[in-house]
Image (cartoon, rainbow, N blue to C red):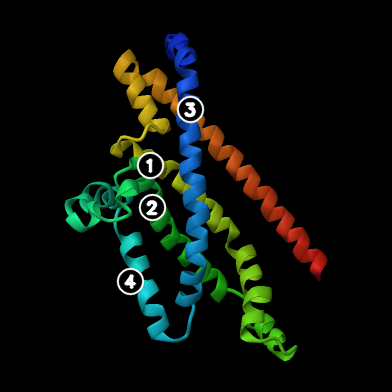
Amino acid sequence: MLNGLRNLDWGVVAKYAPKLVSGAGLTLELVAISVVIGLILAIPLGIARASKHWYVRALPYGYMFFFRGTPLLVQLFLVYYGLAQFDAVRQGPLWPYLRDPFWCAIITMTLHTAAYIAEILRGAIQAIPPGELEAARALGMSKTQTLFYITLPRAARIGLPAYSNEVILMLKASSLASTITLLELTGMSRTIIARTYLPVEIFFAAGMFYLVIAYVMVRAFKLLERRLRVDACQGR
């Protein structure tokens, strides 16, 4: 194993490292935008999914069922290739964005991850001990006050580990953006391989980039979880 690694052409990896860094930057941009906007979209979806009324749950359930039940790759193709088939889309005001692979990837990844984050939030809301909500009502809090001061903060603490897993999954899923011509980390790696014919070296280097990014994200979420636990203890 070690001998095999020594025999690889690491000079080529060093030569193309700046391009890999550029691809990694685009990967981080895709993931950051999609998971942040996805979280914003997921909050009302998750609240609606946790409702006791079926007619409130119905629409979010349909949305989440579709995006959780179909592959991200299919969704990317539907947005990037499928929407262009409609004249109304090509002549509409959003066409400058929908013909750009970057925005198509952002839109698809955002809608995809929002469905998963909403389900995480639904589970977190339903996992809140009923006594805490009863205490809020006993103190005279309205439903809106209870939602913003009790329900959402507690759900954030409960759902944070699952949300961090979703962010890591989106990091790895972002490699699919290369299928619609984006030169993120995987797309840039494939372009370099087409020039150098050295797939092992380049993909190994790309894998190391993904590994380092994932490690940093995991550590950041661990620190955040620890901070929230400390805040919770101090609040008591």
Q: Mark 1 or 4, which is nearer the eye?
A: 1
Instruction: Give me the residue at 65% from left, 83% from top.
Output: 133
SS of the residue under disc 1: helix
Q: Which mark is residue 107?
A: 2
Q: Mark 3 or 1, which is nearer the eye?
A: 1
Instruction: Find the distance from the CA under tag 1 to the CA under tag 2.
Output: 9 Å
Q: Which mark is residue 102?
A: 1
Say left or right for 179 vs 149: left
The disc, 3 or 2, on the residue closer to the chain's N-terminal end is 3
Instruction: Give me the residue at 31% from left, 64% from top.
Output: 66
Q: Which residue is mark 4?
A: 62
**Amino acid type indicated by mark 2:** Ile
Label 2 crowd (10 A; few <14 / some 14-19 / many >=20): many
Label 3 crowd (10 A; few <14 / some 14-19 / many >=20): some
Q: Is residue 141 visible?
A: yes
Q: Which mark is residue 22?
A: 3
> 235 above or below 94?
below
Instruction: Find the distance from the CA under tag 3 to the CA under tag 1.
Output: 15 Å
**Amino acid type indicated by mark 1:** Phe
